[in-house]
Image: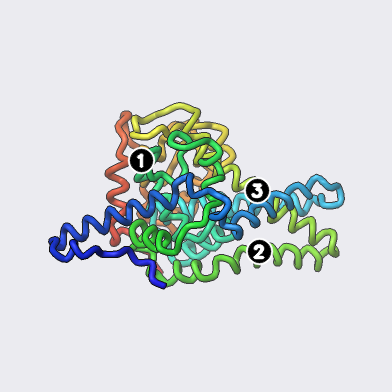
């Protein structure tokens, strides 16, 4: 059954511009409703997401069992945390896809997007589109996760639990990531996202078992998937919650974004959130010499070896924010280019 937005009979007499405006407003209302906290009710829980998040948190608790600890498991956890959180989410999903802070050649684009899928924070198109929506509506009605407009727990994780309609997802993708939606590499990862996520866990279990038996296999699964993902989840979720509540501001943005040092450490530089909201398109998140940004180091390395180019790294002067101008630039379809 079609869920397309209806056109009322009276609209037949309206001009094309008026019909377009009415449709745009109807789609805006649809997205506002889709991310409203009232959507979190018992009959509208996305049980796939909810049970998965509960499962990895329960799995992470198993790390307290002495039999589940191994030094190799811990090493895998730390390595994959950096690979999936910093390279996959911070560099790939966030600064590359959502904000076009750089251009990547095809091998690098494939790898960083794959790492983003392994992080388990959603498919690339949905993640990038939701993040652009957050910037457009930051701390206002329609922001998917604002601790100012809603509550701290909603912004931190509760916003993930409601089920959202196919139509609202379609509108979100079409409006906020139109230049990405039809690209073959993005379509590939959209279709195979779940396979990368579950395949990563099965690979850890299988390789660990092959190396040292079932106990080592379970250790690698617990530490390499569950502990790693729970740590990465909360470190990135703190960007949505804590950095809109506490910290200092370098720029006069229209929202409540702040720079928070401990989130910057946990989230590989993403905690310099006021800097980022003031100048979203910039590749470096740290704008002062003391603002530590590990993800920026990786971008510089990719640029040095020729896999990243057109990196936006010119730091601004003064307290003026360019958030609205930068988001308008991101919306242009022809500004995302990837070299073969």
Number of numbered discs on residues: 3
> Residue reaching furthest front?
9
Name the side, left or right, on which 246 lies relative to 178: right
In the rendered image, the quadrant that contains the C terminus is bottom left
Image point 60% across, 60% down: which residue?
48
> Residue reaching furthest top?
248
Image point 46% across, 49% down: which residue?
300
Choose mark 2 or mark 3, whichever is in front: 3
- The disc placed on residue 200 is 2
Q: Residue 282 lies in what quarter of the image?
A: top left
Labels 2 & 3 near each other (Cβ < 8 A): no
Looking at the image, can residue 95 be seen? no
Mark 1 and mark 3: span between their CA atoms?
29 Å
| Mark 2 or mark 3, earlier in chain | 2
Circle 1 SS class: loop
- The disc placed on residue 38 is none
Q: Where's residue 244, x and y in %?
A: 46, 34
User: Which residue lies under the disc numbered 1?
Assistant: 279
Which residue is nearer to you in this view: 48 or 211? 48
User: Does residue 9 sit above or below 25 in this rendering?
Assistant: below
User: Which residue lies under the disc numbered 3?
Assistant: 230
Within 10 Å of the Cα at label 2, are there few (<14), some (14-19), or many (20+) other Cα atoms? some
């Amino acid at each position: 059954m079609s869920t397309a937005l209806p056109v009322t009979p009276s609209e037949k007499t309206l001009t094309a511009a008026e019909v377009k405006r009415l449709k745009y407003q109807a789609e805006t209302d649809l997205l506002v409703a889709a991310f409203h906290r009232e959507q979190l009710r018992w009959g509208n829980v996305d049980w796939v997401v909810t049970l998965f998040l509960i499962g990895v948190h329960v799995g992470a608790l198993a790390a307290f069992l002495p039999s589940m600890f191994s030094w190799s498991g811990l090493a895998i956890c730390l390595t994959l945390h950096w690979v999936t959180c910093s390279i996959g989410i911070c560099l790939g999903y966030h600064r590359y896809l959502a904000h076009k802070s750089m251009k990547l050649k095809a091998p690098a684009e494939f790898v960083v997007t794959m790492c983003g899928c392994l992080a388990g924070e959603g498919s690339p198109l949905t993640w990038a589109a939701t993040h652009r929506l957050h910037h457009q509506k930051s701390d206002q009605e329609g922001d998917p996760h604002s601790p100012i407009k809603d509550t701290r727990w909603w912004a931190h994780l509760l916003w993930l639990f409601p089920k959202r309609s196919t139509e609202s997802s379609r509108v979100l993708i079409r409006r906020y990531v139109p230049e990405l939606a039809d690209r073959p590499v993005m379509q590939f990862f959209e279709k195979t996202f779940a396979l990368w996520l579950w395949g990563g866990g099965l690979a850890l279990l299988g390789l660990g078992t092959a190396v040292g038996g079932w106990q080592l296999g379970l250790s690698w699964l617990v530490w390499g998937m569950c502990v790693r993902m729970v740590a990465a989840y909360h470190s990135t979720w703190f960007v949505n919650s804590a950095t809109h509540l506490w910290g200092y501001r370098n720029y006069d943005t229209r929202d409540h974004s702040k720079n928070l040092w401990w989130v910057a450490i946990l989230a590989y530089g993403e905690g310099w959130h006021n800097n980022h909201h003031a100048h979203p398109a910039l590749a470096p998140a740290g704008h002062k010499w003391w603002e530590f940004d590990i993800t920026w180091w990786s971008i510089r390395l990719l640029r040095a070896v020729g896999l990243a180019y057109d990196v936006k790294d010119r730091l601004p002067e003064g307290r003026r924010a360019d958030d609205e101008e930068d988001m308008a630039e991101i919306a242009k379809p022809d500004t995302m280019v990837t070299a073969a």
